[in-house]
Amino acid sequence: MASSPDVIVIGAGVLGLCSAAELAARGHAVTVIDPGGANASAVAAGMIAPAIESLLEETTPERAALLRRARDLWPAFTETHGLRLHREGAEWRGDDAETAIVGLRSLGFKAEAVSGGLLTSEDWRVDVAATLAALKRVPGVSVVQARASRLSGAARRWRVEADDGRIWFTPTVVLATGAAAAVEGLPFEVAARVAAIQPIKGQLSYLAGLSTIAVIRTSGAYVVPADGGVVIGATMQAGQRNTDPDVEAARAQTALGLGLLEQTGSEGIVRVGIRGATPDGLPLAGPTEADGLHLALAPRRNGWLLGPLVARVVADGIEGAAPSPDAAALDPARFD
Ligand SMILES: Cc1cc2nc3c(=O)[nH]c(=O)nc-3n(C[C@H](O)[C@H](O)[C@H](O)COP(=O)(O)OP(=O)(O)OC[C@H]3O[C@@H](n4cnc5c(N)ncnc54)[C@H](O)[C@@H]3O)c2cc1C
């Protein structure tokens, strides 16, 4: 037996690691199991973007308010865990900027006209690589390189088996496996929810040496600062699980992004990730009917934005605390 942590989180994407960090801050000993390698969270641009995402998705005012509340958890979350939050805002460029300002204001977001478009101070960002690395170092969290192959037991004595033969026992499991197939041995209802998660392939290109201070977005492309360069993204191909780069799509998107920057550059390095999504675009987060088994899955476009909210909902569920007002919207059983 490897160890017996209070909580095992299966999956070290943004949802698994935010949940682990939140639980550790509340005093739980957490082990995160993940085979390693790039995941959707590491590929992502790291925008915490309730305003422009609400506009693009034509969301309801209620959904926009939920995304704003999720964003508002970030300052305290970064403070607690020693992370860095960038609050330079985001520009929207295009002929539709005036309409976009009206749309953003009608959803309660601030936006002002600037040359060539609009600027909103409501959208922030994090550096994904630095943030994932920092979350793995949070005191009380240990990350183990392994793939969980089978879950068994029930009623607060879960046995988690890795494909290298290691075994853990724990009262509490958080399943945060992204768009991956269901781990064997999940209770039937939970396995059915995981199987219903829709994969969405997305890609962006990393170009070293270019820069922007604010995020810049337009119809069909965005440019976001990243690690000594920028990323230009991103595509969305529903139903696709393969991680082969689409070179033509990347070329077209990069040209759009370079136009936004008014700079020239090479094609860059294409990065591909597979996001998991539910029919309403919100994650499955919180307890299941199996005692001690919790979900943190499938946040679609806004996994980074929703990380601390999912973490709070998951930790409240584990501790049996009064659920936060947004927990019902993320209820894992809402599509049953
Ligand atoms: C190109 C692109 C750009 C994006 N940009 C943004 C953005 O700017 N802002 C934003 O909010 N969102 C963005 N997203 C969406 C965001 O990246 C996802 O919603 C989020 O990363 C999903 O996080 P996750 O933790 O659910 O999944 P993942 O990051 O996929 O993590 C799941 C983890 O589970 C592990 N795992 C799977 N099966 C097992 C197993 N059996 N045992 C152990 N581990 C297992 C995997 O190895 C993986 O590490 C973007 C996505 C893409 C693809």
Image (spheres, rainbow, N blue to C red):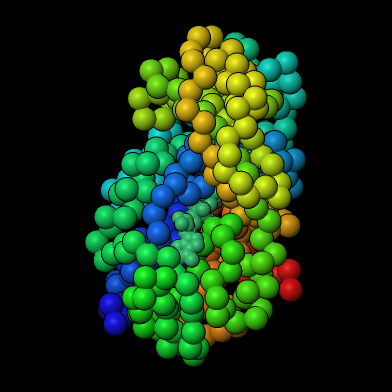
Q: Is residue 228 left or right of residue 253?
A: left
- Residue 237's quadrant in the figure? top right
Residue 92 or 258: which is nearer the viewer? 258
Using the image, determine if residue 110 lies above or below residue 81. Answer: above
Where the N terminus falls, by quadrant? bottom left
Q: Residue at x 72, y 32 (%)?
A: 103
Residue found at x 40% / y 59%: 35
Residue 88 occupies quadrant: top left
Extreme-front residue of the structure: 164
Q: Relative to 51, does residue 319 appear above or below in the rendering?
A: below
Any part of residue 115 in sight: yes
User: Residue 130: x and y, percent?
Assistant: 33, 41
Count of labels in the image: 0
Closest to the observer: 251 or 293?
A: 251
- In the displayed structure, 111 sits above or below 285; it is above
Residue 271 at x, y percent in the picture: 51, 36
Residue drawn at x 68%, y 56% is 198
x, y percent for residue 143: 31, 62
Instruction: Name the spot of residue 226 as percent of width and height, x first.
Output: 41, 30
Q: Quadrant of the C terminus?
A: bottom right
What residue is at 42 percent from the left and 78 percent from the top? 160
Q: Residue furthest left?
A: 139
For residue 317, say whether it is visible: no
